[in-house]
Amino acid sequence: MSMTSHWSRSREVTVNESGPVVELRPVERDDLAFMKALSNDPHVRERVVGWDWPLTMAGQEAWFTTSLQNPTTRRLIVQTAEGQPIGLTGLWDVDWRNRTALTGLKLGGTADVRNRGYGTSAIRALMDFAFLDVGLNRLYSTIFADNGASHAAYVRKSGWTEEGRLREHVWRGGRYVDLIQIGILRSDYDAIPWDDHGDTR
């Protein structure tokens, strides 16, 4: 299974010509070392909302075995068109009755990945998968109030909406940080007009 960043509803056409094409695929055991390095990367850790102890390979192996039995969570590797893994996304807490799910995104902190448009492409590919393939009606997430890159990728470039603010909700970097609650409906997704640069109008 792979999904590319296609916004015309055609699997062959990429309307967002200025953005990189990414693929989403299920996590395999061979990805565990990459996922460990990604989660332990200081640049990534300071920008993702969730927190955990630094990961070990033993912990990753145990997680992988149990994760396959969880019907409400599916993690997906984000990779370039050339097959290079660069991040992790997925659907968490899938509510099959109400057709909602939490989502999030971790991208590698290396210079060849940052500020290249991969984040926006991954968000849009995940939206395609969630709304068109899985059949969900709503996606939601949280981002740090001071994370301008995530806000731009989700809200300005992918059509998400700010839905609320959780004040001083997370302890990060020696201080409490506000979280912005964001979400998008299937009807929002269907109504999005994309311009040649991928921004919503």
Image: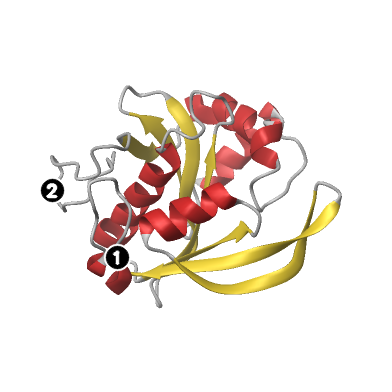
As rendered, which of 173 and 85 lies closer to the eye?
173
In the rendered image, which quarter is residue 122 located in? Answer: top left
As rendered, which of 119 and 140 lies closer to the eye?
119
Judge from the rendering whether residue 40 lies leftward or rightward of residue 30; answer left or right. Answer: right
Q: Eyeballing the image, is 16 above or below 113?
A: below
Could you say which disc has been placed on residue 189 in the image?
A: 1
Judge from the rendering whether residue 59 lies leftward or rightward of residue 189; answer left or right. Answer: right
Q: Measuring 24% from the left and 69% from the top, which residue is drawn there?
A: 191
Task: Residue 180 in the image: state x and y as whole percent.
Answer: 61, 65
* Quadrant location, the N terminus: top left
In the rendered image, which quarter is residue 200 located in? Answer: bottom left
Name the residue at the bottom extreme: 98
Instruction: Write down the residue under mark 2.
Output: 10
Is residue 30 visible in this depiction of the protein?
A: yes
Mark 2: amino acid: Ser
Q: Measuring 60% from the left and 32% from the top, which residue is drawn there?
A: 38
First in sequence: mark 1 or mark 2? 2
Mark 1 Cα shell of 10 Å, populated few (<14), some (14-19), many (≥20): some
Q: Eyeballing the image, is 87 above or below 104?
A: above
